[in-house]
Image (spheres, rainbow, N blue to C red):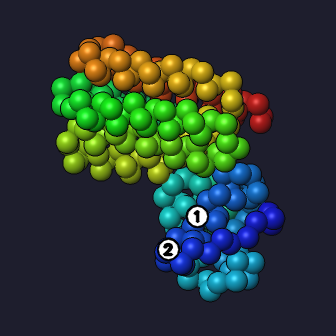
Amino acid sequence: MGNFEVHMDINLPLRDVVFNTLRQAILRGELKPGERLMEIQLANKLGVSRTPVREALHKLEQEGLVLTIPRKGAEVADISEKSLHDVLEVRRALEALAIQLACDKMTVVQIQELADAAQAFRDTLGSDDITRIAEADVAFHDVIHLATGNQRLIQLLNNLREQMYRFRVEHLKKEYYYPQLLKEHEEMIRYIKARKKDEATKIAGQHVDNQVDAVMDMIHTKK
């Protein structure tokens, strides 16, 4: 089992602390694809009871990071081409709708918030903390999503965000993608500010397509 340990946070429930610990271990490769995740073994390693471990594994399964196999138990899920395309195909459609609505509804204040979020993302790129970088990227897109004012759409995107978190991290692990990501963020801001829906939608789609290409490269490299 990987060399990781629980980092306690008095502000979080124990199940969330265990979830964050295991999530980090998977995303950083300390727990490998296909590795068995035994509740008792994990509970002993982390110094907790089995209940928060069980709850964490269930939540990780919802994110697509863990797979439960009948009569075998839980294991770290591998990234498949099918799961990649399924998730990002839906994301592409929802992001297109979100940015179109944002072009109509985004206020001057929200556009500045988006610019600030883009700068915050840029500022994280010198860090070796991949989770921090990924969260900054999420925060950028959240500004667009919230600006739509459509609660159903925001809820769908939030649910989808959990399922695609791993794909986002794999994409961001490769530093040579950073200039393109920064350019796409800047273009989204520019087109939203100019209320140019077609151009904004095109860039949003390209943004998702580039993520697909990056993760596909990773999958094929592993084969």
Image position of 84 (left or right of 25) = left
**C-alpha separation, residue under disc 2 versus residue under disc 1:** 10 Å
Quarter of the picture containing the N terminus is bottom right
* Residue name at image x 62 percent, y 35 percent: 125
The amino acid at mark 1 is Asn
For disc 2, the neighbor class at 10 Å (few under 14, some 14 to 19, many from 20) is few
Q: Look at the numbered discs 2 and 1 and tell me whether their residues touch, using CB distance below 8 Å.
A: yes
Disc with the residue nearer the chain's start (2 vs 1): 2
* Residue name at image x 60 percent, y 49 percent: 131
Query: Which numbered circle lies on residue 119?
Result: none
In the rendered image, residue 214, in percent from the top left (x then y), is placed at 62, 28
Image position of 185 (left or right of 49) = left
Mark 1 secondary-structure assignment: helix
* Residue name at image x 44 percent, y 21 percent: 186
Q: Nearer the viewer, residue 84 or 146?
A: 146
Residue 78 in view in this figure: no
In the rendered image, residue 40, in percent from the top left (x then y), is placed at 70, 81
The amino acid at mark 2 is Leu
Which quadrant of the view contains residue 46? bottom right
Vertical order, 54 against 117 (above or below) = below
In the rendered image, residue 50, in percent from the top left (x then y), is placed at 61, 83
Image position of 161 (left or right of 57) = left
* Residue name at image x 77 percent, y 34 percent: 223
Vertical order, 19 against 202 (above or below) = below
Query: Which numbered circle lies on residue 20?
Result: 1
Residue 21 in view in this figure: yes
Vertical order, 4 against 182 (above or below) = below
Mark 2 secondary-structure assignment: loop
Q: Nearer the viewer, mark 2 or mark 1?
A: 2
Image position of 71 (left or right of 182) = right
Q: Nearer the viewer, residue 60 or 122?
A: 122
Query: Residue beneath label 2, please?
Result: 12
